[in-house]
């Protein structure tokens, strides 16, 4: 049985009183909350093992290096990959920039990079820059107006039309929660040997991606959206392709040998980890992975879906509320608007009740344009939320909306 009381006890922040009300945290899409084991790990590292990695011959250095590399192994097991296929980065944004930089040498003017209309700016702007530098062209799989989702057949038609060199698409949308049909899209792209990049920032915690099943070339994510500390993320790449990418940043750590005449770089993943990495963060993220592994994934999914369906039904019962996106294939994120009210006003009122939601364009301005809106109120649920919190939220939302009417 999915034991929600025990789970909530693991997240100290959820016990907090905000504006004299118990905190209701519905902003996990921005960053997830952290279980005690992750918080403890950070403290433990600085108290007991603080040292640099891959350098010292001393005991602390060894301890730090073993724990750091052990987290890489844990992550590799979690996503069904090999440790050497994983690079630690600052987050999904840095991983995408690393790729956009590294893939420049496969492009010539006129080649196409294909993305979807649902992308976060982090999966648009680096490719735009790459196009500006190489003469490649950015094309977009549009949103289907009626389903407010990317339709597989539209994606396939555009893949056939453009034969893209690179396809970069989110596993799940941060603004609408849509789970995209990436498995079929990846499979279809193989027809043209397209390099496939998946932005898994939102999907990682909710869908636990399997690299062998997905069979994409690269997958990026942020640790802080999956119970881990901020300032950390990762890049998975099939080893041959990862190792073939040119170096991104240079300096210490990423080298095999250096003379004043030339430098020989390390092999992947080391060659992409220049300088002192986020050692405590990586080790703490290993604890986040251990924590996720203790939760039965099918129970987590069923629980998250129950919350999502309940929230959706409750919102649909409020007249004047418009919901957006795919409400079936969804990670548990709902975006809405109320009549012509500004989302910002709704969120400000909700905050008075200790309810944390996100508003605005969610770093998806082109998507908002496709939907003909400026922004939304976004609720992004996680497995540590409860039905009771949704009931509280709905009660207070109705109070807020009555003030705005
Ligand atoms: N991609 C998606 C879908 C996201 O939701 C986000 C962050 O919200 C990012 C990329 C960027 O992640 P980060 O800010 O952790 O680098």
Image (spheres, grey):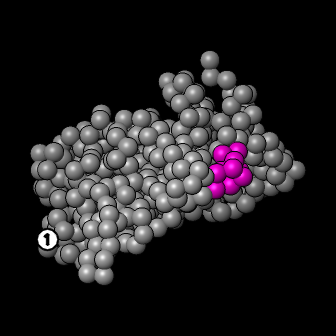
**Residue 119 located left or right of residue 309:** left
Task: Please indicate whether residue 101 sits to the left or right of residue 16 in the image.
Answer: left
Query: Disc 1 marks which residue?
Result: 108
Point 68% across, 55% down: residue: 46
The magenta stretch is 39-50
Q: Position of residue 234 (x, y in %)?
A: 43, 53
Secondary element under disc 1, as helix, strand or loop, is loop
Query: Quadrant of the rendered structure where residue 393 is?
Result: top right
Secondary structure predominantly adopted by residues drawn in magenta: helix
Assess whether residue 49 is covered by the magenta stretch: yes
Farthest residue to the right: give it: 20
Q: Residue furthest top?
A: 1
Q: Nearer the viewer, residue 142 or 321?
A: 142
388 part of magenta stretch: no
* 207 over 270 or under it: above or below: above
At x 57%, y 27%, the residue is: 295
Front residue of 136/322: it is 136
Residue 63 placement (x, y as % from top left): 57, 47
Name the residue: 14% across, 58% down: 162
Residue that appears at 28% across and 73% down:
263
Nearer to me, 120 or 98: 98
Instruction: Please indicate whether residue 367 sits to the left or right of residue 383 in the image.
Output: left
**Numbered disc total:** 1
| Mark 1 residue crowding within 10 angstroms, few (<14) / some (14–19) / many (20+) | some
């Amino acid at each position: 049985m999915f034991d929600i009381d025990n789970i909530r006890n693991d997240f100290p922040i959820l016990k907090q009183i905000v504006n004299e009300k118990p905190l209701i945290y519905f902003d996990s899409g921005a960053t997830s909350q952290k279980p005690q084991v992750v918080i403890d790990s950070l403290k433990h590292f600085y108290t007991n093992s603080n040292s640099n990695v891959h350098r010292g011959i001393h005991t602390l250095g060894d301890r730090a290096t073993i724990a750091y590399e052990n987290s890489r192994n844990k992550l590799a097991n979690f996503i069904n990959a090999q440790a050497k296929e994983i690079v630690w980065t600052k987050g999904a944004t840095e991983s995408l920039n690393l790729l956009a930089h590294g893939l420049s040498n496969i492009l010539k003017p006129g080649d196409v990079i294909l993305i979807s209309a649902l992308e976060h700016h982090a999966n648009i702007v680096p490719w735009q820059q790459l196009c500006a530098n190489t003469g490649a062209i950015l094309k977009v799989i549009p949103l289907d107006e009626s389903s407010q989702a990317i339709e597989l057949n539209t994606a396939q038609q555009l893949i056939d039309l453009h034969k893209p060199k690179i396809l970069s698409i989110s596993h799940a949308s941060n603004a609408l929660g849509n789970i995209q049909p990436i498995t079929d899209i990846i499979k279809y792209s193989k027809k043209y040997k397209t390099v496939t990049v998946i932005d898994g920032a939102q999907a990682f915690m909710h869908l636990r991606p399997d690299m062998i099943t997905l069979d994409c070339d690269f997958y990026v994510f942020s640790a802080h959206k999956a119970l881990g500390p901020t300032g950390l993320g990762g890049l998975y790449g099939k080893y041959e392709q990862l190792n073939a990418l040119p170096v991104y940043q240079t300096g210490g750590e990423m080298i095999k040998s250096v003379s004043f005449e030339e430098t020989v770089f390390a092999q992947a993943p080391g060659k992409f980890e220049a300088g002192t990495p986020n050692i405590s963060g990586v080790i703490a993220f290993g604890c986040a992975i251990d924590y996720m592994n203790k939760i039965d994934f099918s129970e987590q999914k069923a629980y998250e879906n129950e919350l999502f369906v309940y929230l959706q039904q409750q919102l649909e019962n409020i007249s004047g509320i418009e919901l957006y996106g795919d409400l079936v294939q969804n990670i548990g994120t709902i975006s809405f608007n109320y009549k012509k009210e500004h989302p910002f006003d709704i969120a400000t009122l909700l905050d008075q009740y200790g309810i944390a939601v996100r508003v605005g364009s969610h770093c998806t301005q082109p998507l908002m344009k496709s939907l003909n809106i400026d922004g939304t109120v976004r609720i992004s649920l996680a497995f540590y939320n409860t039905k009771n919190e949704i009931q509280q939220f709905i009660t207070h939302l109705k109070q807020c909306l009555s003030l705005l009417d």
